[in-house]
Image (tube, helix red, strand yellow):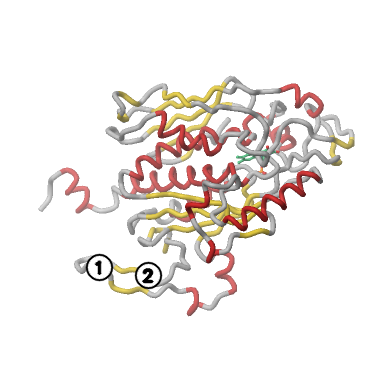
Amino acid sequence: MAGSSYGTIFRVTTWGESHGKGIGAVVDGCPAGLPLSEEDIQAYLDRRKPGQSKFTTARQEGDQVEILSGVFEGKTTGTPIALEVRNKDQRSKDYGNIMDVYRPGHADYTFDQKYGFRDYRGGGRSSGRETAGRVAGGAVAAKLLESLGIRVYAYTRSIGPIEIATERMDLAERDKNRLYMPDARAALEAEAYLEQLMAEKDSSGGVVECVIEGLPAGIGEPVFEKLDANLAKAILSIGAVKGFEIGSGFGAAAMRGSENNDAFAAAGRGGASPAAVKRTNHAGGTLGGISDGSPVIFRAAFKPTPSIARPQHTVDRFGREQEIEIRGRHDPIIVPRAVVVVEAMAALTAADLLLLSMSSRLDRIQAFFGTGE
Ligand SMILES: Cc1cc2nc3c(=O)[nH]c(=O)nc-3n(C[C@H](O)[C@H](O)[C@H](O)COP(=O)(O)O)c2cc1C
């Protein structure tokens, strides 16, 4: 299967299927000397793992990570870091009734068309479980960024029609409710909405918002490796993401230039490239595909979970039309578990582009090697 790796210098490869023996990632290109423990990675996986509330799949996985290589005496060695999570609570028989049937909205039909083969046990690699490898790899990237003063965080912006109110937003609230919403009132309303949908055997979509704070200006490679282009690719590669926008995003299309332009102000540092700060951040932290020093802010739109228990019309592999009712354990909403997946993909992108940026200026290369004037 092509396409399981992401990144140029800081490169992650994810492996494993939903109902195979295990799932994980290999991170290559992480600099040596970074303090890294299983606890660092576990903290990220714990936010993604299933069975946390009635709004996530009832599959019970401890998602305990093991570092198999690339760390010695608590620090990275510069060699590939292999991370493994064993699968424990597979119930492949739940999928027996749909082994030949294409679930509407899922990847069964397209996988079958592409490979002439389909892992019907939980969707194989098209399962949301694949994101455990991304989160494990992203935790390593986040640790690297943290050592450079860069912080990545995400939260649930909306669930169905219920959106957080900017004036009530309180990040401390995010981890206190099961939906990862930084607004207690919106979280309560969203819970009631989800309960109603679950009673109707239906599912909901929503939006995750993510912020990268502390990224210095100058990160991102024109023309094809732009910061925003790479973020879009990373985020749209997460299952069920159907939209990506940065800064004002689609809203910018309805604005005037005079509203949308972020005015610059002097930041006090002179020299060959004087520092400037922006008074607003409609750009979302990037200009010309290069970070501008303000927070990078973007949003990901998730569709409603495709596997729903309601009867649905479909066909099987033999072209027979039929009604199906999907059993098995599914998330009635993907968004709360996906918040940390978005963070992980943003951290992987920022870490990779940071390392790539180190070759853009001769004066910095000379400073690194202690040569030059
Ligand atoms: C964290 C996460 C959990 C998911 N859980 C489920 C689930 O329980 N049931 C389901 O049908 N789809 C789930 N999905 C979505 C499917 O993986 C996705 O819709 C499917 O692969 C089809 O891809 P597409 O929606 O991007 O076209 C989940 C996705 C993520 C990221």
Identify the mark at residue 274; answer none if there is no mark: 1
* Amino acid, disc 1: Pro
Q: Nearer the viewer, residue 169 or 287?
A: 169
- Image quadrant where one finds the N terminus: top right
Looking at the image, is mark 1 or mark 2 nearer the viewer? Answer: 2
Q: Is residue 117 visible?
A: no
Secondary structure of the residue carrying tag 1 is loop
Find disc 2 in the rendering and name its residue.
278
Q: Marks 1/2: CA distance?
A: 13 Å
Residue at x 36% of width, y 45% of height: 145
Q: Relative to 330, is 360 above or below?
A: below
Classed neighbour count for the residue bearing mark 1: other residues with Cα under 10 Å, few (<14), some (14–19), many (≥20): few
Furthest residue in direction left, as rendered: 373
Relative image position of residue 150 (x, y in whole percent): 36, 50
Using residue 367 as the reference point, say whether residue 296 is left or right of it: right
Residue at x 50% of width, y 53% of height: 210
